[in-house]
Structure formats: C-alpha cells, structure tokens
C-alpha cells in the first residue's frame, strides 16, 4: 500500500510538465469604445503609453519590439504600455492570438471592437485621421498624440519627456 502512494506521488510530479510558450493561453480583453475609454484617462502616478496597431500593419509590427522594450526597461519607472489591437474580430483566433504567442508579447494587449471608427477616433484625439500606427503617451501633467511610426530612438526620446529622472 505504501508503495502505491509513493508511485502516485512520483507519477504526479513527473506528469506535470511546463506548457510550452506557444501553447499557453492568451488572455485578451475585447472591449467596445465605452469600456476602453477609461484607459485613455487614468489619473494615476504613472505614465501610460497606448499604441494602436494591427497585425496586418507592417509599420505597426516593425515598431512593436520598441514598445515591448519599454515594458521591460521602464517597469520600475511607473510606465505602463497598452497595445490596442485594431485587428478584425473575426481574425482574432487565426491572426492576433498566434501573433501574440509567436512574439511573446508581455505588454497588455486589448482588442478594440468598435466598428464605428468615425465616432470614436476623434475621442482619442481630435487630430487623428485614423491611420495606424498611432500612439498616446500621457500622465497627470502631460498628454501627447502621435500619428506616426517610431524608430526606437524617437520613441524613447518622446517617452523620456514624461518620466521623472
């Protein structure tokens, strides 16, 4: 009887293997604009970097590693990166989730499911034409909007205007 208990413990320990990165579940919040707009106006003691992007947008994909580097480098400086995907909702399973897994994105990724762009785009910024990539960087004291893609140096230069040194 005591050997069966040891065998059970042994089998339990060795059958619990770590799930490979590509098989891990991705938690993806799907929000309409009313749900999302709270992310645009947080009143906390940190800087928020909100990037609007899509997997089908080559300039967006090119700059994503720079936003990921912010997540890794600036986490102790109270900076939060939020990647807002504008991918089509019917492409989430086939495109967006595999992209997040493949690229091991660590920043929070939200899916904005707000089909009436003409209604919500001006609420993000009145100057935004709707082109992506687009980025909002803000804190309690300052808010800037960028309708452009960034080089790593440009993005870090802009972010450093917001960070207390």
Image (cartoon, helix red, strand yellow):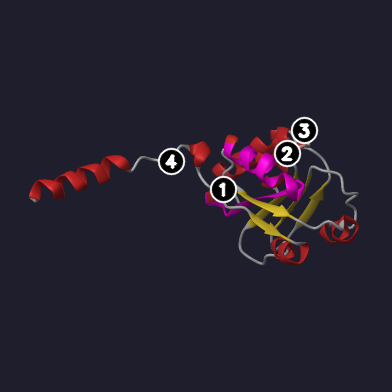
Question: What is the magenta range?
Answer: 76-101
Q: Name the residue under label 4.
A: 19
Mark number, residue 26: 1
* Label 4 to label 2: alpha-carbon separation: 25 Å
- The answer to the question of whether label 1 and label 2 lie on touching residues, with beta carbons closer than 8 A, is no
Residue 47 lies, with reference to residue 60, above or below; the image says below
User: If you read the primary sequence from the N terminus, does the residue marked by circle 1 or circle 2 appear first?
Assistant: 1
- Which of label 4 and label 2 is nearer to you? 4
Depth-wise, is mark 3 or mark 4 nearer the camera?
4
- Residue 27: % across, % down: 57, 52
Q: How crowded is mark 4: few (under 14 residues within 10 Å), some or many (20 or more)?
A: few
Pointer 1 local density, CA inside 10 Å: few below 14, some 14–19, many at least 20: some
In the rendered structure, which disc, 3 or 4, sits on the residue that comes first in sequence? 4
Which residue is at the far left?
2
- Mark 3 and 4 residues: CB-CB less than 8 Å, in contact? no
* Residue 75 lies in the magenta stretch: no
Q: Examine the structure image and report whether residue 78 is included in the region drawn in magenta.
A: yes
Q: Which residue is labeled 3 in the image?
A: 58
């Amino acid at each position: 009887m005591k050997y069966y208990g040891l065998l059970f413990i042994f089998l339990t320990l060795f059958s619990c293997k770590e799930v490979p990165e590509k098989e891990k579940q991705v938690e993806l919040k799907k929000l309409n604009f009313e749900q999302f707009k709270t992310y645009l106006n947080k009143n906390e003691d940190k800087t928020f970097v909100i990037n609007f992007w899509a997997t089908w947008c080559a300039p967006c994909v090119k700059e994503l590693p720079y936003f990921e580097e912010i997540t890794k480098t600036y986490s102790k400086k109270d900076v939060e990166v939020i990647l807002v995907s504008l991918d089509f909702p019917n492409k989430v399973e086939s495109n967006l989730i595999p992209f997040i897994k493949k690229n091991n994105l660590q920043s929070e990724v939200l899916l904005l499911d707000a089909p009436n762009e003409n209604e919500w785009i001006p609420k993000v910024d009145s100057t935004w034409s709707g082109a992506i990539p687009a980025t909002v960087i803000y804190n309690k004291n300052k808010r800037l909007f960028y309708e452009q893609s960034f080089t790593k140096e440009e993005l870090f230069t802009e972010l450093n205007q917001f960070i207390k040194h």
